[in-house]
Amino acid sequence: MTENARGMFVDTSVCTGCKACQVACKQWNEIEPGAGPIPMTDEKAVVEHRAFTGDSYDNTGHLNAYDWRHVKFIEQIGPDRSTSDRTGARWLMMSDSCKHCEQAGCLEVCPTGALYRTQFGSVDIHQDVCIGCRYCVGACPFGVIEFNKNTGRVNKCILCQDRLEQGMSTACAKACPTSSLTYGKVDDLKRMAADRVRALHARGQTDAYIYGWDLGNSGTITAGPNKNAAVKDMEVVGGLNVFYLLMDKPEVYSLPSAPSLPQRNFAPSAGVSLISAAVLGVTGLAAFRRRRMTDAAVTAD
């Protein structure tokens, strides 16, 4: 971890889905509308009151080049939606963005150095160096980065690098009315997260755990379809500088339960390929030798 790395702790247990973070992100970064009919970036659709995804109150659908922050809405209506049982119904909400991973796949595959690690440990993009090759898009296990059709380059959350350089917090954390988003030093945030999980467990909310770092917490989900399932803190891809307190399994929040970097499979795959090539070579050589022996026997007769 970069010394004194900065990041954010996202406490989903107090998120109200107000989307103030989404608005603040767009305003501060002056993000232009998308090139396609994406809800809430299609100005005509907004004016005509048809900018909806049809997925609960979610009006952006996913992170993309024009929405660097995305508020997710998960409705859990009873233990089984196919029945009339509505016990344990609850809403889960989460403000999502780039995780600024400690082991950032996008950094490893970028051929021009357009993606780089800042002095705060975050991952930023030199827009004038990006060539739009999109290698980083496939290398991100969280589906964060997307190609911007307007500019021919890629975009994502850059953790408000310009604000951080002025000693300010991120725009989204500044706008959050419930402190669901907290900006600070990652080490300080991890201590805050551990205290928060312990406090929730003491109140009976044993489903709280940390996604991004292993702080030693474990518990049991108390409501929803996964009720009574065990959960525990998860460190993923070396740790996330933007990490989350979740109340259900990662898949419920559309987060991978075991994210991995595609390039980590290169060496094993290359080894398998070499072994396969060697086996095929030996097999071909043996077949060729048998054929020659057969031809020689026929000639001798």
Image: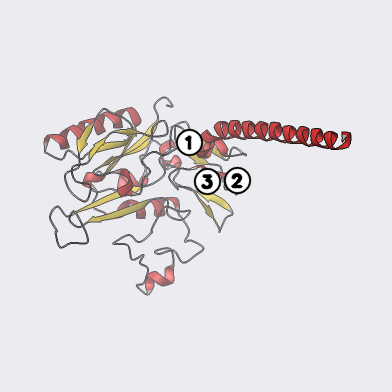
Please tell me which residue is depicted at 31% across the width and 45% down the height of the picture.
174
Measure the C-alpha gap from mark 2 to mark 1: 21 Å
Q: Quadrant of residue 77?
A: bottom left
Q: Which amino acid type is shown beneath numbered disc 1?
A: Ala
Q: Alpha-carbon distance for marks 2 and 3?
A: 21 Å
Q: Residue at x 48, y 34 (%)?
A: 118
**What residue would you read off at disc 3?**
138
Question: In the shown orientation, is residue 150 left or right of residue 245?
Answer: right
The residue under label 2 is which amino acid type?
Asp
Q: Which residue is mark 2?
A: 128
Q: Position of residue 214 (x, y in %)?
A: 31, 30
Mark 2 or mark 1: whose residue is earlier in sequence: 1
Please indicate whether residue 164 sits to the left or right of residue 132 in the image.
Answer: left
- Looking at this view, name the residue that lies furthest to the bottom: 48
**Amino acid type, callout 3:** Gly
Quadrant housing residue 287: top right
Dot 1 falls on a residue whose secondary structure is loop
Q: Earlier in the sequence, mark 1 or mark 3?
A: 1
In the rendered image, the vertical position of residue 44 relative to residue 266, given as above or below: below
- Give residue 43's position: percent from left, percent from top: 43, 68
Q: Position of residue 178 (x, y in %)?
A: 22, 46
Residue matched to label 1: 104
Foreground residue among 212 and 11: 212
Q: Tell me which label, 2 or 3, sits earlier in the chain.
A: 2
> What crowding class fits label 1: few (fewer than 14 Cα within 10 Å), some (14-19), or many (20 or more)?
many
The location of residue 245, given as percent across then percent down, is: 27, 40
In this view, 163 is above or below 286: below
- Mark yes or no: residue 18 visible: no
Number of marks present in the image shown: 3
Q: Can residue 278 be seen by looking at this rendering? A: yes
